[in-house]
Amino acid sequence: MSERTIERVRIMRSWEWARPVRPVRREVLSATPELEEGQPLLLFVPGFGHGAWAYAEHWLGHAAERGFPAYAVSPRGHGGSGPAPEANLRAYAHDVVQVAAGLPRQAVLVGHGAGALVVAHALARYPARAAVLVAPVLGGWATFGAALRRNPLGTLPAVFGGRLRLSRRQLFSRELPDADARRHAARLGRAARRAQWQLLTGADPEPAVGRPPVLVLGSPDDRVVPSSALTRAARRYGSAPLLFPGMGHDLMLDARWREPIDAILDWLVKHPARDDRG
Amino acid sequence: MPTPTEHGRPDPETTTLARSRDGRPVSDRGDTVCVIGAGASGLTAVKNLAEHGFGVDCYERETGIGGAWNWRHDRSPVYASTHLISSRPFTQFPDFPMPDDWPDYPHHSQLLSYFERYADHFDLRRHIWFGTEVVRVEPVEDDRWDVTTRSTGGYGPERTSRYAAVVIANGHNWSPKLPRYEGLEQFRGEVMHASSYKDPAQLRGKRVLVVGAGNTGCDIAVEAAQQASHCWHSTRRGYWYAPKYVFGRPADQVNDTLLALRVPLRVRQWLYHRTLRLTVGDLTRFGLPKPDHRVYETHPIANSQLVYHVGHGAITPVPDVGRFHAHSVELADGRQIDPEMVVFATGYLPRFEFLDAKILGDDEGVGRPRLWLNAFVPDHPTLAVAGLVQPDSGVFTLSHWQAVLFARLLRLRTTRPERAAAFANRVRAGAGERYSGQVKDSTRHWFEVGHADYLRALERALRDLEGK
């Protein structure tokens, strides 16, 4: 077992105790294997604008076929969950932890895009079995700069509380049939204003509890997350990113969706649940 | 899910390496840690020790988890209507929240289902030996411990296993504390301790005297007000009866807003007094004695209904009991009342009958260990007591962090022994430290802690232990 860097544990959370997040109706989609094989259980968290539907398209079913019980949650204000125009990142992380704690076993949290940031926050409040960050948008000014450069018209309105708009060409590779791309893009919603701002101004996630192993993966051709950001995110968790060239930002919807999910499941099979379990 | 019978049972035949002092075989469990009790504190100890990579054997005398919160257990103090006193955010384990659509103050049966889910979610049952009680815990060389167990009720042979460390989580709300009164033996009415109070039907149509103004005493008085033909409520002193809700929010959440703003104690007390004055009003007008202390100086009572029923005349507040006669009770002020039934809600005392009292620094054997952070034992670095706290909020958050701190301490004993040694010095120097403001001297406040003071002290201890 290797000692990681000393992390400052936070015990006092007076504000969170004094102001608990309000409950909301949460959409959870799932696909479970016909035969329970004791494989790790996965909880997928979509990025801003996406809902659980993004995973229901391919990944949930595929994971279940390979024997992994798979669930996807729509954070409040997304997909089929209740509306929450005033939500912040804390509320999204709360939704993830609530669903995770309601599952029968310790879950592996898989977050995509800004959902990876939500997962990073959730990891400080729930001892996940492992975590997977897919094309993670962990916030910060560098991400903002990249977004502004690549998609100024979609990014600028968000600064003033408008919707953060991603173009089809950012989300999907050209391999994906246009009809599919159009269909997915039409389903995109938006995250709450405050949550969008928190991508820039929010506090860094606190250290994860229970020291879960973390996998980072993405595409070098992602037009939302530059590969430097992928490397940075992976380094934060002491590893290197797993790369899938030629894919767009939405790895779970793109034409070659099968490769990343297979890589995640293989990693879960090979990787021990915790480096020092005994 | 694997069950305890399938693997790993400490088995003297295969692993015996040593003998106990009196020559019995001891099965050596290596680095495994022993946890005594599978109640809330025991469960979180098992979970956090396992999470830190330790093997864990947990012994539970009952056949289920939940300890005090499992109403099926004969030592459980809960009664049919028991609800939480602290609201959800203060009561749940910090890394396993209760469902957010549960009420602010869940019922005890919900709490039990929460613990069941906690145990299932983290697969804790595979570490627990049910129906097994701990008979003796004895220190042996190298800071290790011989733990002798047998089937609950004394059946079957005793077996001894040697552990690297022990967490005592046997609870402190099961051994009733009964005050002595002159003439109590002659009293012809029914006498019971609140521990055997289960259902308001027990009170129906009777003239009931409830002694004690803890949260249990107040709950029972309120139920007696609705069920009994008359209810007297005897208290030693005047108390502050805090409503469960102020300004439409759970009172503890309002209180913690002030804590989050770092409002000093004196100001908080003043605000609290003002708020109670404006909402509950002047208690002496109801015939209740004036509190002889400021709020936060006794364990908080959260009961919105007591004063209401006093106002209905259904509860008659009376002073302390002076003595008992065959058919009446004489009060401290000389008044005579004639209850048919007396319920003593006079609390509980901790008991560690399997352990030499001196080990916990309780030289007089009264049940008050001398510990640091209410958990760590001077000169016994591999022994900890979990959940021996009476906070002004939920216990489980505190137990969780005690377990985390202990697990990290045990890990550092091998990786950074000098840090563990520094911690041991800290334990020795700090034993007996208190983590609350001034409190009234009473057995009731032996383990009283302010949750913010206590958790801050624990946070400091954790950072000192692991700091750069």
Image (cartoon, coloured by chain):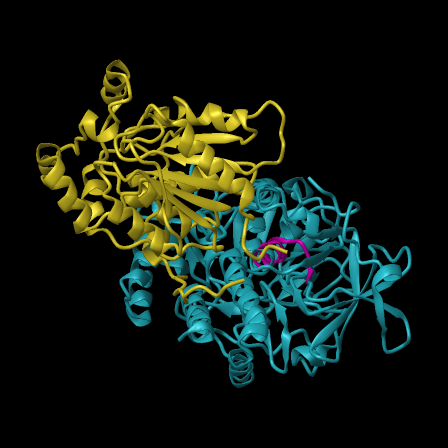
Chain colours: A yellow, B cyan
- Residue B95 vs B350, above or below: the answer is above
Depicted B237 relative to depicted B431: above or below? above
Q: Nearer the viewer, residue B457 or A201?
A: A201
Vertical relation: B366 (above or below) A218? below
Task: Find residue B188 and report its horizontal and vertical position in percent.
Answer: 78, 56
Give the residue displayed 69% in from the left and 76% down from the top: B366
Drawn side of residue B40 relative to residue B326, left or right? left
B36 in the magenta segment:
yes
Task: Using the rendered view, name the quadrant where residue A54 is placed.
Answer: top left
The answer to which of B393 and B183 lies nearer the viewer is: B393
- Find residue B412 and report its image quarter: bottom right
Q: Is residue B278 left or right of residue A145?
A: right
What is the number of callouts on the image? 0
Q: Quadrant location of the N terminus of chain A?
A: bottom right
Q: Residue at x 65, y 81 (%)?
A: B361
Indicate the quadrant containing the C terminus of chain A: top left, top right, bottom left or bottom right.
Answer: bottom right
* Residue B206 in picture, x, y percent from top left: 67, 45
Percent across and percent down for residue B328 are: 69, 59
Residue farthest to the front? Answer: A245
Instruction: Tell me the chief SS of the magenta region.
Output: helix
Q: Is residue B62 visible?
A: yes
Q: Residue at x 16, y 50 (%)?
A: A141
Q: Which residues are magenta?
A: B34-48
Residue B338 shows up from this direction: no
x and y percentages locating residue A30 in the rendered image:
47, 26
Magenta span has B188?
no
Q: Is residue B337 left or right of residue B248?
A: right
Determine which quarter of the picture holds residue A174: top left
